[in-house]
Image: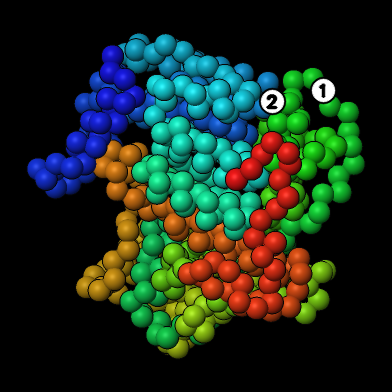
Amino acid sequence: MQTAASRRQFFKVAAASAAAPFILPSHVWSAETAPSERLTLGFIGMGKMNSGHLGNFLGRKEVQIVAVCDVDTNRREHAKKTVEERYAKDKAANYKGCEAYGDFRKLLERKDIDAVVIATPDHWHAFIAIAALKAGKDVYCEKPLTHNIHEALTLIDAVRSNKRILQTGSQQRSSKEFRVAAELIRNGIIGKIDRVETAFGAPAKPNANPEEPMEPGLDWDMWCGPAPLVPYSSILSPRGVHNHFPAWRMTREFGGGMITDWGAHHIDIAQWGLGEDEHGPVEIIAPEKFADANDGAKLIYASGIPLLHNGKGRGVSFYGANGEVHVNRGKFELVLGGKTIHKFWDKETDKGTSLDREVIMTEREYLADAKVKLYNSKNHHEDWLNSIKTREKPICDVAIGASTAISCHLMSQAYYHGGSMKWDPVKHEYTSGGDAKWLTRDYRAGWVV
């Protein structure tokens, strides 16, 4: 059986070969991949998000999951059982079992693991991703990539210096309606952009959850990790296997509220459409009553175009001189000259058509000869695996994921501190109105980025 190093060398040689003018589709690779040539994966953080990723990758013949990790005994043992039961059904899998770990560092010590999928609470993302990169692993990391701006910049350096592949879990980029929406904007179909409006919920608040008794089987100290060691709360981390997204994301200590949760998705698409996805804003304006506000902040880009945070709306809305583009998951609308040209927003009101039909028709009519063609990924997981093969950047490379995270963190600071802040997206520093200490956090002893 080949080692992880030999597999990586194989992929490097394949990427360098001039005789390979195209990437084989995943199903072709899967059919011809011998067990010894499969990518071996480890999963870190086994909540709802990674349970979904786990199910997807278990159905892919080109990979083999050999390890899972979670600080909750019940979650990691459930994930281990899920993997082993699935592979037990495949007699040709040549499978040797799945190990369950309570400490991600033990998983990363394994030389036979090629890549990891990270879906922990946000405050752990950068720490685990950087450790994985230094251990020679490629990474799929959920958004937001980081808990603060300092971590985002450090993570970019870690990916580049270790020559690894990192895919940000901003999967909207791999959905056709979002790509077509961004291409319409990039190609000027609705004219000069006046503004962009994004719809998502409130910023994070300081943790105020009361202490609760904790059942055995959870390493709470490790769960908190680099963040403050707060009293245990099931609101932050409900025990065992569950099917919802816990509210740690709404606390400043561990997340960034809906700004880094849904906002990370929608701001990413807004910046993709504006061509700012590796840059970011130059000014951040807080709402007047920022301390109590749940929306109203603005990001201003070098072009002068504002991005508005609305608590309610239609996902991402671009408003131009000649029309509008609205897009959300499974929803799309193109308006030109005040008239709806193509639309699928609601299956009850938009009967007789479909999302695919409206998006495909838009692409044929307005983008067939487009000068700007954006990266076309049809599946976010598959795109990552192909990038591991070719060593080319994936659709949401670390530079893009970090830029989106930084924009989200800057918007959050507007709600935390108020006022107007000027930002240099090249030097990554405030030029007025901000404070350098906002770029990072006070890390708990023993944890440093």
In this orientation, does residue 435 appear? Answer: yes
Cα distance, mark 1 to mark 2?
A: 10 Å
Q: Is label 1 in a helix, a strand or a loop?
A: loop
181 on left or right of 75 = left
Q: Which residue is mark 1?
A: 215
Give the quarter of the image for residue 186. bottom left
Q: Quadrant of the N terminus?
A: top left
Quadrant of residue 240 in the image? Answer: top right
SS class of the residue under badge 2?
loop
- Quarter where residue 368 is shown: bottom left
Please tell me which residue lies in front, 200 or 361. Answer: 200
- The number of numbered discs placed on residues in the rendered structure image is 2
The residue positioned 46% from the left and 51% from the top of the image is: 157
Q: Residue at x 64, y 60 (%)?
A: 439
Rendered location of residue 46, percent (x, y): 60, 31
Q: From the viewer's perspective, is 162 left or right of 21?
A: right
Observer-nearest of 333 and 402: 402
Residue drawn at the location 17% of the way across and 46% of the way down = 22
Q: Residue at image x 32%, y 63%? A: 374
Q: Amino acid at mark 1?
A: Glu
Q: Amino acid at mark 2?
A: Asp
Asked if marks 1 and 2 touch (Cβ < 8 Å), the reply is no
User: Where does the image place residue 34, in percent across and percent down from the top left?
Assistant: 25, 20
Left or right side of 5 for 159: right
The residue carrying mark 2 is 72
Q: How far across and how far down the image is residue 356, in percent?
A: 37, 58
Q: Quadrant of the C terminus?
A: top right
